[in-house]
Image: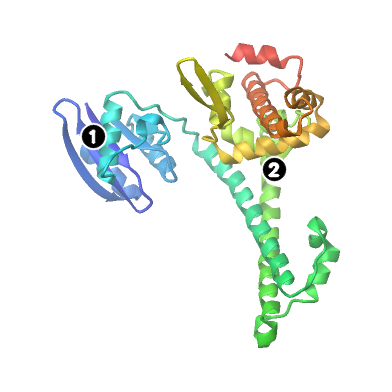
Amino acid sequence: MKILAIDLGKFKSVSCLFNTDNNQTDFQTIPTLRWAFEQLLNETQPQQVVFETGTVSGWIYDLCINLGYAVLVANPSEDAWKWQNVKRKTDKDDALKLAKLTALDQIKSVHMPTPESRQYKRLVKFRKDIVRRINQFQSGIRSLLCAQGLNMLTRGKAWTIEGLATLEKHRKPLSECSMEELWRGELDIDLTLLDTLSEQLAKIEKHLTQLAKQEERVQLLMTVPGVGRRTAEVIVTSLDDPHRFQNARQVSSYAGLVPNQRQTGQTNRLGRISKRGSNLLRSALVEVAWISLRYNPWAVEIFNRISGGQKTRRKTAIVAVARKLLVRCWAMLRHNQPWNPALMPQLIVKAV
């Protein structure tokens, strides 16, 4: 059997053609471009193609599938893939190890969404990135005025019409600023970039709103009290196909909301959550868990039961609410059922 293992890189990739019959290997370094991969596949004609998940793995996966090759996408965070106590680690070593682990059937394939689903998820993540950039500019503007001994309105009031009108009085084109007023030119540039980002964010939100109206899964999750369109989009695009998870434990582990476990002999310790999953999904769930305490009686009951009224257990309780909420959203998507706290336990049991 010929296994083509590829260590992917942004600019170049290293392939290892491993023949399991005679243990022969053949290495090649190619540019990470479509034509180069097509040529590599035509030359090697492997029975199995394997590479690790990453930024460029999507289009390479589509290319291999369209050409009729069996593809295995590996998760580099799996225990079998970790390097320990080695003196050398190169791209060739990575490719060879990936090939040998595949031959030993030690690689678990990760789910690869459709191109449409990947684009949808990318746009949702891009919106989050634009919001992060806007927050950075707002923090920079506040710091700039603070350095000049000037005050701004507190919190969100600073970015209202009244707050922005106050900032307009201080801005000045950089070309017109004297040496003592360079900060005014910097403020002018920051406000211009902030306006541009805000306009682009509005366009993204408008398009995502249109997509959400056409996406039944998003509309289904919005029946959960406290869950809005943005959180529903994150959950839907992250889980993609709910049937790929066999039980609630797998869903929780995918989001990194299960505790790390250390067991030896009669000792069994559960530590902090693993955080091995999607940071976007996990942060959205924790955020909506806090919001749900105002709108969802079910979340309030779970939170109070776990926290026991102790302030030191509030964070533990909110993570538990986030995990349980994710499991219920997964069950809703799997059975196409709207929010019903009384029906959720039965749906979760059916999914196991």
Left or right, residue 182 beside residue 244: right
- Residue positioned 69% across, 14% down in the render: 345
Q: Position of residue 84 (x, y in %)?
A: 33, 37
Q: Quadrant of the C terminus?
A: top right
| Disc 2 residue crowd, few under 14, some 14–19, many 20+, Cα 10 Å | few
Q: Residue at x 32, y 42 (%)?
A: 7
Could you tell whether 270 is left or right of 194 in the image?
Answer: left
Out of 210 and 239, give the one closest to the viewer.
239
Identify the residue shown where x is 75% and y is 36%. 290
Badge 2 marks a residue whose secondary structure is helix
Residue at far front of view? 266
Q: Quadrant of residue 24?
A: top left
**Could you tell me if residue 236 is visible in this image?**
yes
What residue is shown with label 2? 210
Residue toward you, 65 or 231:
231
The image quadrant that residue 145 belongs to is bottom right
- Give the quarter of the figure containing the N terminus: top left
Percent x, y of residue 238: 57, 35
Report whether 98 appears left or right of 22. right
Q: Amino acid at mark 2?
A: Gln
For marks 2 and 1, give the CA distance: 43 Å
Instruction: Say whether disc 2 or disc 1 marks the residue closer to the N-terminus.
Output: 1
Where is residue 79, by image quadrant? top left
> Does dot 1 land on a helix, a strand or a loop?
loop
Type of residue at label 1?
Gln
Foreground pick, 18 / 317 = 317
Give the percent coordinates (x, y) of residue 150.
78, 72
How crowded pointer 1 is (Cα within 10 Å; few <14, some 14-19, many 20+) is rated as some
Residue located beneath label 1 in the image: 45
Q: Image check: 250 left or right of 329? A: left
Q: Which mark is residue 223?
A: none
